[in-house]
Image: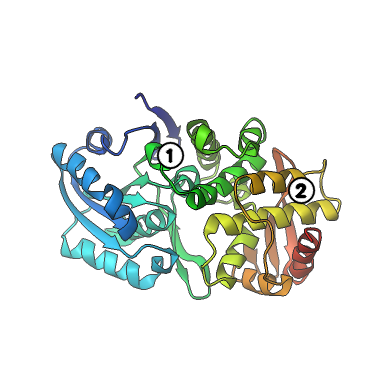
Amino acid sequence: MEHRVIPVHLRESYNVLIGGGLLAKSGSLIRVALGDCRLAVVTDCNVAGLYLDGVLTSLREAGYDTCSFVFPAGEQSKRMDTLSNLLEFFAEERLTRTDCVLALGGGVTGDLAGFAAGCYLRGIRYVQLPTTLLAAVDSSIGGKTAIDLPQGKNLAGLFHQPSLVLCDIDCFHTLPAEELSNGAAEAIKTGILEGEPLFSLLETGNVREHIEPIVTQCVRYKANIVGQDETETGPRKLLNLGHTVGHAIEKCSGFSIPHGYAVAIGLAIIARAAESLGAVDEPIAARIESALVRNGLPITTKFSPEALANAALSDKKRTGGQITLVVPRAIGACYFLELPTAQLENFFRAGMEAGK
């Protein structure tokens, strides 16, 4: 099966490949992009049982010397002690500045492995091999890497662009329904930003049937945004739509609520708040809620506006007494709202009461 190639145009550009069977061909594809080096594969214990042996076989058949690091699955591993263990593993394996890290898995793996690659020896190359829809449409592209601190999500990190991204859509066809929904939330976010036809495609609720065009359109949109704004000083901030609330929900839940589910609730709250405050060009809340529900996602939370506002004070998008929210004006049109942090609780309340 032929794969699609979407370039990310930066000072050091790279390609995102999308298609079936890419993990089985990962060795030859990586050799074309990177040449000869040593490869350290980083993955979690769940993904290791599904894909690690196959990837290692492909890499070795392509002539690569490899090693692998497996950590416990889950957001709870995206923290300082796992990062420390991973960096020490790289040192024990004597990786050099010409070697490369492979992030095989979902968003946690990509964030952790990318951060470690960016820190080790002041930065070595890495490749993203996303195995979840969530990672494919969002976190594997653009070079954002991070770990969580007890005070909040993604508070320690750096921008470190991958050298290659391989999106094997065969991985997404076999995802359980909950994990597919988790990724659909980020795709819906992209659809709200980009507009039609992506949003209409997601409104059907048939993500599994349309997996390749959805991944392709999301990747193309994000590649374009990242190409304009690599380090999130301008239009890339739009990609935070739903995330201020979403990250607050994750923190309040002790990270027991998956990222996509939290973002879905955030999208619904922001859309309802914007509509109830008259800050929209057209009715959008019902349409966004419907798209979320059809994809098996929640649109309400048990946490109070006060609790969410307090949690959001640790958000990276806060500067002094202001916080930047991304607010939808219409499908395909969003804008930045600079809100005093003292007003955040009331803004959240408006979106939550409108959903009752």
Residue located beneath label 1 in the image: 173
Q: Is residue 11 visible?
A: yes
Residue depicted at x 49% and y 43%:
137
Towards the viewer: 227 or 245: 245
Q: Mark 2 falls on what kind of element?
A: helix
Give the x, y percent position of residue 35.
21, 37
Mark 1 or mark 2, which is nearer the start of the sequence?
1
Residue depicted at x 43% and y 42%:
172
Instruction: Say whether residue 246 is left or right of residue 28.
Output: right
| Amino acid type at image mark 2 | Ala
| Amino acid type at image mark 1 | His
Q: Is residue 231 visible?
A: no
Towards the viewer: 12 or 262: 262
Figure check: 79 above or below 281: below
Q: Quadrant of the C terminus?
A: bottom right
Residue depicted at x 71% and y 72%:
304
Give the x, y percent position of residue 86.
28, 64
Q: Are marks 2 and 1 in contact (CB under 8 Å)?
A: no
Towards the viewer: 272 or 211: 211
Residue located beneath label 2 in the image: 285
Label 1 Cα neighbours within 10 Å, binned few <14 / some 14-19 / many ≥20: some
Q: How far is the residue under mark 2 from the one under mark 1?
A: 29 Å
Instruction: Say whether residue 50 is left or right of residue 331.
Output: left
Give the x, y percent position of residue 268.
70, 54
Q: Mark 1 falls on what kind of element?
A: helix
